[in-house]
Amino acid sequence: MAMWNPWRGCHKYSEGCQFCYIHKGDKRRGIDTNQIIKTDNFMSPIEKNKKGEYKIKSGQVVYLCFSSDFLLEDADDWRMECWRMIKERSDLHFIFLTKRIERFEACIPDDWGSGYENVTVGCTIENQSRADERLSIFKKLPIIHKNVICQPLIEEIDIVKYLDDVELVVVGGESDKNARSLDYNWVLSLRQQCIQTKTNFEFRQCGTHFIKDGKQFKLNVRQLCAQARKAGIDFKVEQI
């Protein structure tokens, strides 16, 4: 696994951004998150060592732009160079998430066709209105590998009609002392929708405020992922 952040910074875009961990972390460090800048790691995928070998070894999954949004408008002048590197490193698999899926077709290279085999796109949603808005677009896009990221999930949602060509649905709650609660029943509902449509499902993290069996719990941020794993409800299609 490798991380590649060709630029940093982002702008809050929708309801799910209210307690964004990037903005919170930057604020503590006195950094203006709304200032979008190219990073020193921009060329990371094609950097080589003294032997002429790629520093990022073949076969790895590369998490792309996880401190920003790959489809951010501020980065339009830089993105095509990123696509060139992604194409050059066809031996790596790149994953990026976006809340700006409506910009996708304006941001892809001319040779995209039906998609690059080594790219997974995750469309992020947080409530029913954003799910309907974004997934209705996502469903029609030429992308070989599609994930849906319901994180932070802030209300119960029904996405079953959008899951035909989705490989994975990820669900998670919100992390903040003022976070909106995650109800475990919402998580189980999404799991059932994935079972119904034979879609892989992952419960990635609880929320700071977590409701189960009608009881409200407050969890430490360090517990969120561990408690989700402890639930043991991840679903893989081959289990059928």
Image (cartoon, rainbow, N blue to C red):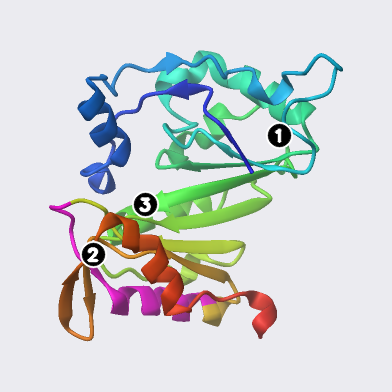
What secondary structure is found at the residue carrying circle 2? loop
The residue segment tinted magenta is 177-194
Q: Is residue 50 left or right of residue 130?
A: right
Residue 108: horizontal and vertical position, in percent?
61, 30
Q: Distance between the residues labelled 1 and 3?
A: 24 Å
Q: Assess whether residue 160 is covered by the magenta stretch.
A: no
Q: Residue at x 64, y 17 (%)?
A: 43
**Quadrant of residue 80 within the rendered picture:** top right
Q: Name the residue under label 2.
A: 219
Q: Is residue 41 visible?
A: yes
Task: Please name the predominant secondary structure of the magenta segment in the image.
Answer: helix
- Which amino acid type is marked by label 3? Glu
Give the CA separation, mark 2 to mark 1: 43 Å
Q: In the displayed structure, would residue 213 be above or below residue 191?
A: below
Name the residue located 59 percent from the left edge and 67 percent from the top edge: 164
Percent position (x, y) of residue 181? 19, 65
**Callout 2 touching callout 3 (CB < 8 Å):** no
Which residue carries the number 1 mark?
112
The numbered mark at residue 67 is: none
Residue 180, percent from left and from top: 18, 59
Q: Name the kind of residue labelled 2 in the image.
A: Leu
Check disc 3 and report the residue beneath it.
133
